[in-house]
Image (cartoon, helix red, strand yellow):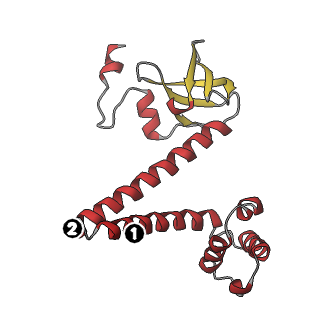
Amino acid sequence: MQAKELEAMTRDDLRKLAKERELPGRGSMTKAQLVEALADDCAQNDSKPISDVVAQQDEVQAVEEVTTAQTAFDGDLEVSDKDNESFKRGMMKEREEKKKAERHISHVENAQIGAIVAFKDERGKVRSAKIVKRSSQKRKLKLQTAYGLDFVVSYDDIVWVRNGDRWPRGIYNLLKGIGENGEQDAQAQDN
C-alpha cells in the first residue's frame, strides 16, 4: 500500500492498522506519523501487506454492521442465530466475490496489446484471441483470432489473460468445449 492510500484513511483506521501490525507508540502518534510508520513497516515486512489487513478490517466492519443492524431489530423480530450466521456468511461471500471481480478486471486492464486472452463470444462459446486494441473508457477490447476473425468484447467477457506458454487446465478445457463434468458441450458438438 502506498503512502497516498494511507493518507486517505482516517486516523482511527490508521490506528487500527497500526494495532494489527503491532507498531509500538501508535496511541500517541499523529496521523502523519502513523502514515510514515505504517509505510516503513510495510516496506520492511512484506509478509503481512497492509492491503490484506485493510481487506480483513473491511470484512470485520461488515460483520459488525450486520450485527449492529440485527441488534436494532432484535426487539421487533425473532431471528434465529442460524439465520443470522447464514446472513453473515452471505455478506462475506458477496464481498469476496466483489473483490475477486475487481482483481479480474485489473488483470484485464493491465493486459498488454498482443497478449492472448480467452473470452466468451456472443453465443457464450469460449475462444482465444490476441488483443489488438483497447478502449479503457468503454471498457472494451478489440480481439483477433488466429484465423483473422475480429471480435469486440467487454472486459466482463474476458475469461482469462494468458501470462505463460500454457492455459490453465480449466480454461484449456473450456476452449476445447469440454465442460466441468468432462463431457463435450452441446455447442462444441454442433461445430
Are circles 2 and 1 on residues that touch, CB within 8 Å? Answer: no
**Separation of marks 2 and 1 at Cα, in angstroms:** 15 Å
- The location of residue 163, given as percent across then percent down, is 62, 40
Q: Residue at point 45% right, 40% down? A: 169
Is residue 181 found left or right of 174 in the rendered image? Answer: left
- The location of residue 32, given as percent across then percent down, is 79, 72
Q: Residue at point 76% right, 78% down? A: 30
Disc nearest the viewer among 2 and 1:
1
Q: Nearer the viewer, residue 141 or 76?
A: 76
Amino acid beneath label 1: Thr
Is residue 126 found left or right of 23 in the rendered image? Answer: left
Residue beneath disc 2: 80
Q: Which corner quadrant of the image does residue 81 belong to? A: bottom left
Q: Is residue 164 visible?
A: no
Query: Neighbour class for label 1 at 10 Å: few (<14), some, many (≥20)?
Result: few
Q: Which corner quadrant of the image does residue 162 belong to? A: top right
Label located before the other in sequence (2 or 1): 1
- The location of residue 82, given as percent across then percent down, is 23, 66
Q: Residue at point 63% right, 27% down? A: 138
Secondary structure of residue under mark 2: loop
Q: Nearer the viewer, residue 132 or 30?
A: 30
Q: Which mark is residue 68?
A: 1
